[in-house]
Image: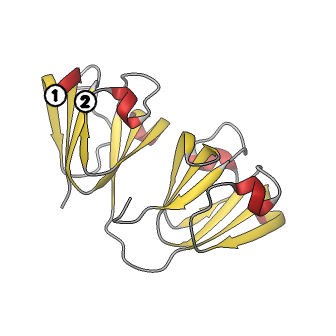
Amino acid sequence: MGKVIFYEEKNFQGRHYECSSDCSEMQNHFTRCNSIKVDSGCWVAYEKPNYGGYQYMLNKGEYPDYQRWAGFNDCIRSCRMVPTYNGNYKMKIFERTDFGGQNLELNDDCPDLNERFHTRDISSVNVMEGYWILHEHPHYRGRQFFLRPGEYRRHSEWGSNSPTIGSLRRITELN
């Protein structure tokens, strides 16, 4: 069981809200979020309600201000716990929507997608095993997109405005 605490002010001050399961709407509990403590588990925090907007991967630890989780602002409105997973990792990425065009199967992290796939455009994904995070830029920088097992026929289904992806990695207990 995981636990995360969201605080309105920096350095774990002000009103706070403790969460131990997925929460699709947190606006009633606090107005802004400037620090977070992850006591246990691995979490994805979202800028907007119902798991929308910017996404932030949160591992166990303390984040005294929003820059520490690569936040674009102090707005967190929903969160989701990443289930503990110890199995294999496998995903297939496709250049075009609906699983068309050039494709590549991955079982491991990829710090520079363009170097490996010769394109930065991923328009559809089939996550067969494991939980993954896509990053907008190479070397795990920029916007993040959390993917659970399943089929994503177009980039908007994982919350992106663009098919451009620079890197991707598995979500493991070691992250």
- As displayed, is residue 103 above or below residue 29? below
- The circle on residue 64 is 2
Please state the horizontal and vertical placement of residue 84, each as a whole percent of the image: 31, 68
Q: Which residue lies at the image location 54% right of the left edge and 60% below the top edge?
A: 169
Q: Is residue 96 left or right of residue 42?
A: right
Q: Which residue lies at the image location 62% right of the left edge and 61% below the top edge?
A: 110
- The circle on residue 12 is 1
Count of numbered tags: 2
Residue 126: image quadrant is: bottom right
Please state the horizontal and vertical placement of residue 136, each as a whole percent of the image: 63, 42
Q: Is residue 66 left or right of residue 100?
A: left
Measured in 3D between alpha carbons, the distance from the residue under mark 1 to the one under mark 2, in whole angstroms, is: 6 Å
Question: Which one is earlier in the sequence, the residue at label 1 or at label 2?
Answer: 1
Q: Is residue 135 left or right of residue 57?
A: right
- As displayed, is residue 126 above or below residue 71? below
Q: Quick check: marks 1 and 2 in contact, CB under 8 Å?
A: yes
